Amino acid sequence: MIFSDPMLDELCVVAVSMMHQFDSQNLSNSFWALACLVLEDIPLVAALSERSIALMPEFVMQEVANIS
């Protein structure tokens, strides 16, 4: 079952608007949280993915494992 909640929807909107401030740890934690919630907010996943690609050289192995 996919989890959905209006507050989480708004959180996703805010997270996308702040994506330029996310570092590799923030990205890793966000992907992990989305997976745990089975949350499939496509704009958020797209923004996280784009930012992750830009910061990929900064990721350590645990962060890479979290986004897999």
Image (cartoon, grey):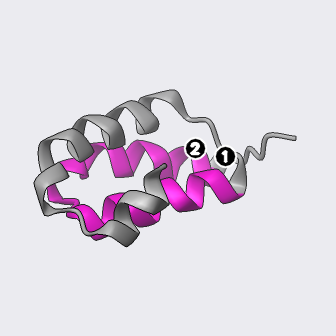
Amino acid type at image mark 2: Asp
Q: Position of residue 3 (x, y in %)?
A: 77, 47
Which residue is identified by label 2? 9
Number of numbered tags placed on the structure image: 2
**Residue situated furthest right in the rendering:** 1
Which stretch did the figure color magenta?
7-36
Q: Position of residue 31 (x, y in %)?
A: 48, 53
Q: Residue at x 24, y 63 (%)?
A: 24
Amino acid type at image mark 1: Pro
> Above or below — where is 39 with respect to 23?
above
Kindly report the secondary structure that dominates the magenta region of the rendered protein.
helix
Specify whether residue 18 is painted magenta. Answer: yes
Q: Is residue 34 left or right of residue 53?
A: right
Q: Residues within 10 Å of mark 1 (few under 14, many from 20)?
A: few
Q: Position of residue 47 (x, y in %)?
A: 32, 36
Q: Is residue 55 left or right of residue 14?
A: left
Q: Residue at x 62, y 36 (%)?
A: 40
Q: Secondary structure at mark 2?
A: helix
Q: Quadrant of the N terminus?
A: top right
Q: Position of residue 11 (x, y in %)?
A: 49, 53
Q: Residue at x 56, y 35 (%)?
A: 41
Find residue 51 and report its image quarter. Answer: top left
- Residue 6 is tagged as 1
